[in-house]
Amino acid sequence: MTTTTPTTTTSPRDRAAALLPATPTGLLIDGSWRDASDGGTFAVENPATGETLTRVASATGDDARVAIDAAAAAQASWGATAARERAEILRRAFALVQERREDLALLMTLEMGKPLAEARGEVTYGGEFLRWFAEQATHDDSRYAHTPEGSLRMLVQRRPVGPCLLITPWNFPLAMATRKVAPAVAAGCTMVLKPARLTPLTSLLFAQLMVEAGLPDGVLNVVPSASASAVSEPLMADPRLRKVSFTGSTPVGQSLLRSATQNVLRTSMELGGNAPLVVFEDADLDVAVDGAMGAKLRNGGEACTAANRFYVHESVAEEFVSRLADRFRAVVVGDGLDDGTTLGPLVEAKAVDSVASLVDDAVARGAQVVVGGSRVDGPGHFFQPTLLRDVPADARCMTEEIFGPVAPVATFRTEDEAAELANSTEYGLASYVFTKDVRRGLAFAERLEFGLLGLNVGVISNAAAPFGGMKQSGTGREGGFEGIAEYQETQYVGMPL
């Protein structure tokens, strides 16, 4: 298979027609592209049209075992590779991602649905993990010292944890791959990557770019599959696997954590969210509305960090809802390839059903629809940007992750009430607070049980920042200085003086 850049043509659809046949659709195992062992494939759909884009090889359990064979065989030599060489591979990969940014963005829009402008933004965001961990690969926080008693010399050093299983979600098909692959490469770990069934194409093209950047055979193996368990179960049971990193739903994460106990695997789990967005009475409402738009409608609301519950002080609620409604009405819903589209489709039909049921439930419990509230007729999987007000606490959209363009608004009176409402969830990933008083915002942050907080801003993810949650939103951190440590073991050597 080849990834020759197609000739640039005048429209995204023309470019797509040239790009799709040039995009890998097989399994990458030990440096070679191959079919599934049983010849099986699965369809990848364009959520804007419902049409099949292409078919991708569907890995079996046997393929997963061959992939871990390759990763295990490559681990010793890759782990011993000089940190500078690993950094240079990541640096070259970053450059290749920038060269192919239009192709990567186009694939994301085709298979996931987000507007092309947002897809380009993800290429920028995802590429930064390659650059960040290229810079971190050569930093060594090993240390040498005497013990306090003066009886031993103490050497503390880092080493790669070993072969890793990386399971990525469908909503950020490039960034979630780079956020896991880059620190594993920097730390000297080999990998088996299982991309999401709904959006494997972007990850497959990225894997090809990693090969072109000089990554040795067997270091990165990619096994898309129509059945996640067919791949994950044999890998999790293999004693040679030493770590699993998963981004996805809490129930699946819990299942993987149970499986991880068998071989006492290192785990990184970035799971579900139920992010509160709190607007205090002293907030700059222009800033709050801008932040709400980013926190809610970025990626169509299909993000674990998306604002899920809006709590607005009763004294400014009317004005906030009015301003947000104007912004929601200005959103242009359509195919992400079309100029002017600012909200694409949901990823599949059952996602539309799920969002519709949450809106219907809220209305049945007394919520008022301010904007939207319905599916969009026609092909594809579209739902109107929807703003609800007076949403009761027992509405399902206040307790379940919406994963769609729906903003439910409720009010509060006191800071204590706001903190109680914000924390009234088993999740603890992202949160957002808007106030002109920075001291108040920081003090309020200390009361929140969330791993991430946006203070007067609605989009905060960054390669240099540690990303992860509390409670049932997961364990471990990705990105930042903390990200590479998730792929390293710490070894202490004691020596006599």
Image: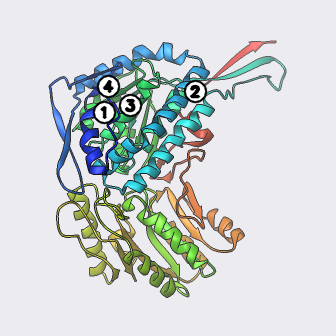
Along the viewing direction, whichever of 79 and 133 lies nearer the viewer: 133
Which dot marks residue 28?
A: 4
Whether residue 383 is visible, yes or no, is yes
Kindly report the distance in space between the C-alpha atoms of the residues bearing marks 4 and 1. Answer: 16 Å
Which badge, 1 or 3, is on the more N-terminal residue? Answer: 3
> Residue 194 at what x, y percent from top left?
33, 35
Whether residue 277 is visible, yes or no, is no
Are the residues tagged 1 and 2 within 8 Å (C-beta)? no
The vertical placement of 398 against 51, above or below, is: below
Which dot marks residue 87?
A: 2
Q: Quadrant of residue 315?
A: bottom right
Residue at point 49%, 55% (across, down)? 429
Q: Quadrant of residue 492?
A: top right
Kindly report the distance in space between the C-alpha atoms of the residues bearing marks 1 and 2. Answer: 29 Å
Q: Which residue is mark 1?
A: 232
Query: Around disc 2, counting alpha carbons within 10 Å, would you say few (fewer than 14), some (14 to 19), or many (20 or more)?
Result: many
Query: Around disc 4, counting alpha carbons within 10 Å, would you say few (fewer than 14), some (14 to 19), or many (20 or more)?
Result: many
Kindly report the distance in space between the C-alpha atoms of the residues bearing marks 1 and 3. Answer: 19 Å
